[in-house]
Image (cartoon, rainbow, N blue to C red):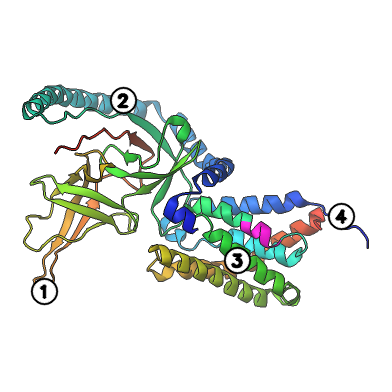
């Protein structure tokens, strides 16, 4: 146990056992997958048309904002080259599906259907359409386990999008709350602030939305404010997640 | 000395497989804390019924699978299940003659012991659960023991596992 916890010496054994367990997990997932498939194929023609229409309008909107993004990105690269800092490039992404199996209810972990055969490594960041979800902690050839940002042993370096104030968001074990400790009472932080990844720690790429501050409590008797945030990602509803290959950040001197 | 023929090993393997699958089965949020320790219950049954076949070694192997399933540190469930198997082997002659109610009380104590061991290990790792709901599985295991016992006993008699 000590070997596994401290040195990760038993990764090989764990990976082998995971491969043995994977068919079981697959079987457990099967009824749910069949249910999804059935509800998809038995959908009404009309609802499909409607969905198609809304998706098309949304895609158009996204396309327009992408147009703007392209010019913004070019401008950003130009400005960065003026500042002689390393330019950021888009990372490679991979879509993985969740396998519906339960873990310990006191941890927040999920199982993905992609593993080391798809090039997933330990520590891969995980995002969905709304924000950062977590990171991969165990990889086996066919599947991988990821820890969500709300797991009690997870911490993620963040910054306040409005003013760049840096902090760390800790998981609480509850599905919809993060704890942000060690922020002084007089810090400029308020309810509704958007928290994004800061890229420090070199695990999560910088600039992805993480959470929104829901409560700031300043008690003059305590050295630090009590700050709670809600994750933006749909941690308990997501079916598909994106795995991001972290960009190579060059630390400037 | 007569040679003893073992048969029906696949029934034992299947029962553990089903127990592991039940451990992973997604439950609604309110029920997630109530999930009984299926694998522990099946292990206790087989240790009690066939102590010469199922013992500490099998408990350890099943525990390793549980570790992987729970994403826990490799060895914590293995250690606890090996210990449970050891205690059951010591108690099996007494447990066999107890009525079901008394058996389920012993199951409660055994599952509590397993959970205690796991909180200790987690405490060392700094991940100890801070809610009393953590202890609920031992209660649900106790309540479901009679049912598990009867199902497994009928299976054993039907397939003449020995």
Q: Chain of mark 4?
A: B
User: What is the quadrant of residue A136 in the picture?
Assistant: top left
Q: How far apart are the two marked residues, 2 and 4, measured between alpha carbons? A: 65 Å
Q: Is residue B58 magenta?
A: yes
Q: Chain of mark 1?
A: A
Q: Is residue B114 magenta?
A: no
Instruction: State the SS at label 3.
Output: helix
Residues beneath discs 1 and 3 located on the same chain:
no
Q: Position of residue B67 (x, y in %)?
A: 52, 54
Of the numbered discs 2 and 1, the one sitting upstream in the chain is 2
Mark 2–mark 1 CB contact (< 8 Å) = no
Q: How far apart are the two marked residues, 1 and 3, measured between alpha carbons? A: 50 Å
**Disc ID at residue A83:** none
Q: Chain of mark 3?
A: B
Q: Nearer the viewer, mark 1 or mark 3?
A: 1
User: What is the quadrant of residue A240 in the picture?
Assistant: top left
Instruction: State the SS at label 1.
Output: loop
User: On the image, numbered disc 1 is attached to which residue?
Assistant: A221
User: On the image, numbered disc 3 is attached to which residue?
Assistant: B144
User: On the image, numbered disc 2 is attached to which residue?
Assistant: A52
User: On the image, numbered disc 4 is attached to which residue?
Assistant: B5
Instruction: State the SS at label 4.
Output: loop
Q: Nearer the viewer, mark 4 or mark 3?
A: 4
Of residues A165 and A104, the one nearer the viewer is A165
Residues beneath discs 2 and 4 located on the same chain:
no
Q: Residue at x 21, y 34 (%)?
A: A250
Residues beneath discs 1 and 4 located on the same chain:
no
Q: How far apart are the two marked residues, 3 and 2, measured between alpha carbons? A: 48 Å
Q: How far apart are the two marked residues, 2 and 1, measured between alpha carbons? A: 56 Å
């Amino acid at each position: 146990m000590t070997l596994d916890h401290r040195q990760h010496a038993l990764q090989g054994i764990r990976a082998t056992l995971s491969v043995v367990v994977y068919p079981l997990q697959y079987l457990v997932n099967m009824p749910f997958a069949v249910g999804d498939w059935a509800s998809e194929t038995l959908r009404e023609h009309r609802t499909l048309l409607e969905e198609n229409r809304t998706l098309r309008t949304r895609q158009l909107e996204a396309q327009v904002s992408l147009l703007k993004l392209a010019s913004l990105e070019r401008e950003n690269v130009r400005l960065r080259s003026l500042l002689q800092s390393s330019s950021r490039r888009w990372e490679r992404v991979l879509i993985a599906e969740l396998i519906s199996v339960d873990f310990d209810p006191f941890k927040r972990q999920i199982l993905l259907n992609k593993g080391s055969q798809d090039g997933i490594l330990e520590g891969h960041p995980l995002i969905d359409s709304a924000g950062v979800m977590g990171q991969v902690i165990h990889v086996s050839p066919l599947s991988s386990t990821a820890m969500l940002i709300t797991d009690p042993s997870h911490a993620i370096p963040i910054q306040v999008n409005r003013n760049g104030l840096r902090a760390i968001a800790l998981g609480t074990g509850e599905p919809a709350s993060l704890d942000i400790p060690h922020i002084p009472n007089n810090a400029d932080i308020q309810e509704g602030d958007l928290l994004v990844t800061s890229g420090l720690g070199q695990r999560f790429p910088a600039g992805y939305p993480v959470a929104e501050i829901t409560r700031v409590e300043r008690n003059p008797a305590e050295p630090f404010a009590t700050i709670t945030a809600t994750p933006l990602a749909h941690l308990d509803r997501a079916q598909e997640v994106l795995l991001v290959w972290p960009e190579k950040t060059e630390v400037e001197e | 000395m007569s040679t003893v023929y073992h048969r029906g090993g696949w029934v034992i393997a299947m029962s553990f497989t089903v127990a592991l699958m039940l451990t992973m089965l997604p439950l609604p949020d309110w029920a997630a804390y109530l999930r009984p320790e299926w694998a522990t219950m099946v292990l206790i049954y087989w240790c009690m019924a066939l102590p010469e076949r199922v013992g500490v070694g099998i408990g350890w192997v099943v525990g390793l699978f549980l570790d992987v399933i729970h994403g826990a540190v490799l060895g914590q469930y293995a250690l606890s299940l090996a210990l449970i198997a050891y205690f059951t082997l010591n108690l099996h002659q007494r447990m066999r003659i107890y009525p079901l109610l008394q058996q389920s009380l012993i199951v409660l104590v055994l599952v509590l012991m397993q959970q205690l061991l796991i909180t200790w290990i987690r405490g060392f790792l700094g991940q100890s659960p801070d809610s009393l709901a953590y202890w609920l599985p031992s209660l649900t295991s106790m309540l479901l023991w009679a049912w598990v016992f009867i199902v497994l006993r009928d299976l054993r008699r039907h397939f003449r596992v020995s």
